[in-house]
Amino acid sequence: FSQNGYDRMKSLKIAGFSDKQIALYTNLTPLAYGAAQVRVLRKSLGVKPCVKQIDTLAAEFPADTNYLYMTYSGDYDDVSEGTHDVIDTTGEPMTPSTKAFKNRIRSLSISTQKMENALAEKQERGVIVLGCGAYCIGSSVEFDWCAVSCVRQLRKDGFKSIIINYNPETVSTDYDESDRLYFEEMSLERVLDIYEREAAAGVVVSVGGQIPNNLAGPLARSGVKILGTSATDIERAEDRHKFSDMLDDMGLKQPAWSVLSSKEEAAAFAAEVGYPVLVRPSFVLSGAAMRVASDETQLQNYLGLAADVAADKPVVVTKFILGAKEIEFDAVANNGVILNYAIGEHLENAGVHSGDATVILPAQKLYVNTIRQIKKYATAISKALSITGPFNIQFMAIGNDVQVIECNLRASRTIPFVSKTLHHNFISLATRAMCGLSAKPYNISLLDIDYVCVKAPMFSFTRLRGADPTLGVEMASTGEVACFGDDAVEAFIQAMLATGFKIPTPGSSVLLSIASDEYRREFAEAALTLNKLGFKLCGTPGTVKFFKDHYNLDLLELRKPVDTADHSACDDTGAPSALTYIKESDVELVVNISEGTTRKDEISSGYVIRRTAVDFGISLITNVKCAVWLVKALDRQLYQFKAKSVTEFYNLHLND
């Protein structure tokens, strides 16, 4: 670039090479540092992208829209630049302690007039909100709802709002939702370009999911003003090694853990604490590459996958706790002080990803001491991380023994669910806190709410040929619904119906294939109820024998299929194949609950039964607690209900 540098650099940028790619091909390592060097050189040469407006009127009339994009192929901008100098925090590390100290010093010297002038300047500069990007498993409309709620509150408070998002399906990319909308990729380079051009007062990274949250550190190190929780603390929570260390230092309980330094050390740790163990990469969304290993062979395989996904981030191995209840804590905090919170419980035991779990709000079956411990732990974590904005902590509990699973310093996918259930927008409150405005807590009493809301997942297994329709620690759902009810079971069955679940009719067949005696005992009362309601029960050999021996309940025995082509009857008993029975008889519900082992017959036979049920449009339940609740709803005939408006439930609460 020493000769004719401008033309050479611009030609590379027009050809689509990012700063990071240029650093890679010119051996400027490490890449993060190299990309920053290329950026400095590019700007010194005067090579900057132009901002262009998308013509929405087909050139028939002058188009004055806020649909914007950046390109190196233009020679002039279609919209004006920000009139202020860029806020650059480089060289000014804002750790929680120094930030708090500076704020205290400022409070002694800044007059009210100066504060008003500062607010007016921030409003004029505007705030950049990073959207959710492309929809995928784990990042969907729930994060777009958060981004839109944030932008609407910004505009309500007089701030110029700037959105960066490249997904035209989202509401945040509607023309009237923001003052400026950039249809651009969520990359460090592009966000920096827009931040510098707009001279914004700051960037909100905590309402768009994991993609913008992962940019917090790189943006802060590049001098960008991050609004809300500091980038240092965001990374402290995302880095599973640092977070686990912090919990140990604070004396907060968590499952036994170890950082992966070698596969041999991980195997030794697993042998010490006992299998199963959970392999957990850092900085990932929807449990990507998270796996439960039941033996050393699985552990070795999963460690390799996690290391690939996590790149240079830590991979932690933790003891996987069986039979624990998982609890969601969603909250908004301001400078480490919790303003509002909600506690929801998973119907399924821990081990099902929170995005795939059936969540009940307010929690219905938690001990008072458990709730007290959760609030105590959450308060301590919020203070330690000096949280300002939305956050989510996941806990597990066995009895009153509470342990921390993880903490996300961003809006979770349950924040819209919480906000709509409690009829108060948590993101609006978080936005005011992040912008330094007065954030008055909502008047919420979880004990006084006279209704229950249940969130149920939706899956696309019918469209994913060959996928195993079962749940685990990595998210698989592609949507969710939530329904209100006078009690939890009523809300549950309505939510199930809203997902498209078909209620079996009395007199039809119900196929039971339950892998372990523990789950069979838990489902026993429900099986007796199904028999009482007139359903014809059939099952695989182990399930049939258990209910006959222990409850004198007769089920038609079916042979486990070996593969998808196995339609033959049992040679010894003449029992028909479960596969044939599903396809040719009147089965309307399949309850298939595996024990989570890696036994070959469990994987092959269970998979074939589950997959066949999905392919033939038969209702399928793969979790014992969901199956029990379904039978409770059938027994009470709660599927025959009169739909109510959500307003009726809100008014019920107000009338009290």
Image: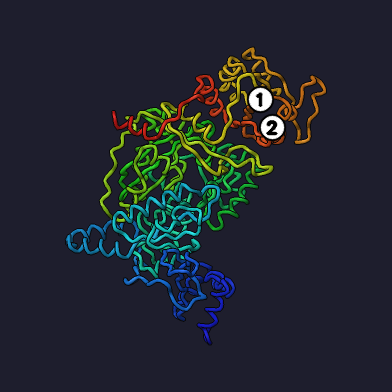
Q: Nearer the viewer, residue 586 or 347?
A: 586
Q: Quadrant of residue 463?
A: top right
Q: Position of residue 466 (x, y in %)?
A: 69, 42
Quadrant occupied by the C terminus = top left
What residue is drawn where x is 62% and y is 51%? 305
- Going by the picture, which residue comes out furthest to the front? 60
Say if residue 245 shows up in the picture.
no
Residue at mark 1: 511
Q: Position of residue 429 (x, y in %)?
A: 32, 48
Whether 284 is drawn above or below 293: the answer is: below
Residue 401 horizontal side relative to residue 106, left or right: right
What residue is drawn where x is 67% and y is 15%? 554
The amino acid pointed to by label 1 is Leu
Whether 150 is drawn above or below 345: the answer is: below
Q: Position of residue 145 (x, y in %)?
A: 43, 48
Residue 157 horizontal side relative to residue 235, left or right: left
Secondary element at image label 1 = strand
Q: Which mark is residue 609?
A: 2
The amino acid pointed to by label 2 is Ile
Q: CA distance from mark 2 to mark 1?
A: 10 Å
